[in-house]
Image: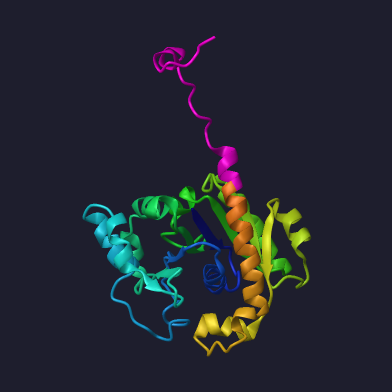
Amino acid sequence: MLIALCSAKGAPGVTTSALALALSWPRPVILAELDPAGGDVLAGYGRGEMSAGGLADLALAARRGGPARHLDRQLLRLDPEGRARLLPGLADPVSARHVDWDRLGAALVAVEDGAIDVVADCGRLRAEHFPDAVVHRAAAVVLATGSTLRAVRSATQAIAELRERDACPGMLGALVIGPGEPYGEREISEALGVPVVGALPRDEKAAVVLSDGAPAGRLFVQSALLRAARTIASRLVESAAAHQSRVAPPPAPVPASVIAEGGSRVR
């Protein structure tokens, strides 16, 4: 199942939020850094670790015949158990123009026949070379927004734009970062006209671990940020799966002649 995160103008902490969700995901998951402006996880959470592969190499493999069989070798562990892995983003934003987002999206949807989920950090909605084709394939598209008047106004415009260009046939929702500044989840949901999947609190001590690689400490996994992320991750998995079940086409009826040939009774 592919979950796409994107942001409107001025939305705070989208990459940090995507990383928090991936580390809290209830199933095996890949965090795919698809922001055309480049990837930040290795420089921050990875403490400057360099990777020669990632999205750039996967994009090159796609031009040579398909990225699916090359995906696994581009992934890095985000946790000791390897339940959460990272597809590092572009080191040079200029190369975003060469990425075949449609092929990449197809590969991410089909990871191990859907047994592994993918959380895709797609960056800012109006960015050049935004991965529309990936968003179009997602089971759920989540727009990250702050709770200020300026942030909610930008998010309202972004939701309208997603709907107008039919960019997200999957479930559409919002993630609130820093609720109560001054608006709460219910007010934001009413303003946007989409459900709010949850809210991540302002937890600077935990956020700096994810954004800048600060030492985690033994209480990091029990931080307010990670506790909220676990709740949201579980809710997203359930909601996206339920949405897919509702919109899935019904099975084609079996012709009576076929049933008869199989030995079943036909009335």
Residue 265 in the magenta stretch? The answer is: yes
Which span of residues is magenta-colored? 242-267
214 versus 145 height, above or below: below
The picture places residue 191, in percent across and down from the top left corner, at 74, 55
244 versus 38 height, above or below: above
Residue at 57% x, 41% y is: 245
Q: Is residue 140 visible?
A: yes
7 versus 91 height, above or below: above
Residue at 66% x, 81% y is: 203
Q: Is residue 189 left or right of residue 62?
A: right
Residue most extreme to the left: 64
The picture places residue 192, in percent across and down from the top left corner, at 70, 54
Q: Is residue 152 left or right of residue 132?
A: right
Q: How many marks?
A: 0
Residue most extreme to the top: 267
The picture places residue 47, in percent across and down from the top left corner, at 43, 86
Residue 116 in the magenta stretch? The answer is: no
The picture places residue 91, in percent across and down from the top left corner, at 35, 74
Residue at 39% x, 55% y is: 111
Q: Is residue 67 visible?
A: no
Q: Quadrant of the C terminus?
A: top right
Q: How was this image coloured?
A: rainbow
Residue at 48% x, 48% y is: 136
**Toward the viewer: 84 or 105?**
84
Q: Is residue 107 left or right of residue 64?
A: right
